[in-house]
Image (cartoon, rainbow, N blue to C red):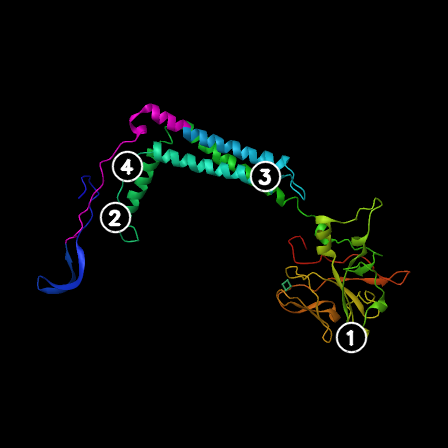
């Protein structure tokens, strides 16, 4: 048995057998019990902490907690400084094999969070009230009485934490938690600015050649047989600026390619049913469509020659290329955008214009 109130434990132990009990004429069956053979060792006598008996130790602990919270604030500011001053890109300065920006951002945010955690632990271990509590098992649904006790205990806990009496700890904690919002706000900056009309256009424009996507060679109508499909791109991806540098490279090239990639297919002209206004978008049965699925943007080129269907390997959306790219199966909600074609003065296939609608998956400003 414990020498402190509230620490006793109930001791009857069930033997696994049932016994009949006579209660005023009614006989009921109850589990047989016997005393617990292992004595309750109880708890050692309570030892006060140094901060409970020494005002000096208490003040020192308070300063430790405040220092940790202040350090957290410094780390949060460091995160913001690193975000704006260190290069984030293809060639960041490398530290220990990692980009300097990532290292500093990770360390500063990590230490900001860690310091708040350590400060809270120190606060509760050294400064909050040091009372041992035993909670016995009880039914899961709390009674009204227990709920009232809980609210009372919570209020008592708040009171015991001394948050009202320790303005230094309270204010530095509020400051540290408030500063943590800064990295979040700064990181949200990467979501903007909104894309505007960028998603509605690609690099295609009138007169731009449609070229083979591997070699960049221009294509003539005679290069395609009936039933054939060719993966293609705009010629500008293979062109250089006057200084010899490619017009598109790196991330810019990948982003432009993700919108401008196309497929050229050739069918028998009599199999094609162009929509009104699209009668001159093809060349003798050669049509050009976006290669980007309108469901969630997978590149498509699984072509069924006989049916003129194009199948997306991701979720099986199927588009009828003889019928304006109409969706005939699967989750895609819109037809495949078509690129109008013509032939230039040298006999090569070129675009008549950019796409007349945004390519790829839906987005909220699509209209
Ligand atoms: Fe093509 Fe889902 S991305 S069907």
Identify the residue at horizontal 73%, vertical 69% (top origin): 321
Q: Earlier in the sequence, mark 1 or mark 4?
A: 4
How far apart marks 1 and 3 lie (CA) works out to: 56 Å
Q: Using the image as rendered, state which of residue 190 and residue 354 is in the foreground.
A: 190
* Residue marked by disc 4: 131
244 displayed left or right of 326: right
| Location of residue 212 with respect to 198 vertically, above or below | below
Q: Using the image as rendered, state which of residue 276 and residue 304 is in the foreground.
A: 304
277 displayed left or right of 190: right
| Location of residue 329 with respect to 173 vertically, above or below | below
Whether the residue carrying mark 3 lies under 8 Å from ligand 1 is answered with no
* Residue marked by disc 3: 186
Mark number displayed over residue 136: 2
Q: Is residue 96 magenta?
A: no
Q: Are marks 4 and 2 in contact (CB under 8 Å)?
A: no
Where is residue 204 shown, x and y percent of the image? 79, 55
Where is residue 259 shown, x and y percent of the image? 72, 56
Q: Residue furthest top?
A: 56
Can you see residue 197? Answer: no
Mark 3 surroundings: few (<14), some (14-19) or many (≥20) residues within 10 A: few
Badge 4 marks a residue whose secondary structure is loop
Q: Residue furthest left?
A: 25
Whether the residue carrying mark 1 lies under 8 Å from ligand 1 is answered with no
Q: Are marks 3 and 4 in contact (CB under 8 Å)?
A: no
Mark number displayed over residue 271: 1
Q: Which residues are magenta?
A: 35-63
Whether the residue carrying mark 4 lies under 8 Å from ligand 1 is answered with no
Identify the residue at horizontal 64%, vertical 62% (top origin): 295
How far apart marks 3 and 4 lie (CA) works out to: 42 Å
How far apart marks 1 and 2 lie (CA) works out to: 80 Å
Badge 2 marks a residue whose secondary structure is loop
Q: Quadrant of ligand 1?
A: bottom right
């Amino acid at each position: 048995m414990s020498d402190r109130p509230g620490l006793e434990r109930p001791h009857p132990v069930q033997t696994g057998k049932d016994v009949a009990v006579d209660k005023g004429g009614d006989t009921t069956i109850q589990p047989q019990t016997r005393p617990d053979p292992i004595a309750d060792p109880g708890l050692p006598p309570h030892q006060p902490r140094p901060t409970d008996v020494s005002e000096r130790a208490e003040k020192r602990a308070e300063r430790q907690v405040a220092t940790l919270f202040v350090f957290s604030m410094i780390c949060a500011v460091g995160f913001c400084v690193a975000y704006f001053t260190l290069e984030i890109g293809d060639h960041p300065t490398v530290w220990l094999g990692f980009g300097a920006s990532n290292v500093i951002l990770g360390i500063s945010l990590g230490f900001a969070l860690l310091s708040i955690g350590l400060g809270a632990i120190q606060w509760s271990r050294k400064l909050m009230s040091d009372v041992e509590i035993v909670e016995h098992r009880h039914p899961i649904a709390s009674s009204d009485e227990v709920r009232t006790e809980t609210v009372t205990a919570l209020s008592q806990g708040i009171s015991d934490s001394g948050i009202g009496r320790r303005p230094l700890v309270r204010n530095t904690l509020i400051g540290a938690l408030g500063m943590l919002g800064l990295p979040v706000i700064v990181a949200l900056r990467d979501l903007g600015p909104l894309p505007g009309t960028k998603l509605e256009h690609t690099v295609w424009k009138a007169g731009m050649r449609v070229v083979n996507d591997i070699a960049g060679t221009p294509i003539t109508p005679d290069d395609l047989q009936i039933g054939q499909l060719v993966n293609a791109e705009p010629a500008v991806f293979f062109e250089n600026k006057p200084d010899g540098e490619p017009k598109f490279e790196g991330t810019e090239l990948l982003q432009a390619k993700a919108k401008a990639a196309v497929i050229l297919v050739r069918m028998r002209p009599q199999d094609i049913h162009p929509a009104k206004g699209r009668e001159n978008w093809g060349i003798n049965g050669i049509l050009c469509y976006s290669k980007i699925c309108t469901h969630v943007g997978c590149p498509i080129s699984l072509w069924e020659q006989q049916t003129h269907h194009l199948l997306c390997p991701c979720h099986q959306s199927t588009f009828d290329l003889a019928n304006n790219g109409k969706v005939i199966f699967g989750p895609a909600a819109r037809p495949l955008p078509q690129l109008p074609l013509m032939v230039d003065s040298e006999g090569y296939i070129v675009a008549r214009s950019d796409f007349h609608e945004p390519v790829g998956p839906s987005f909220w400003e699509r209209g």
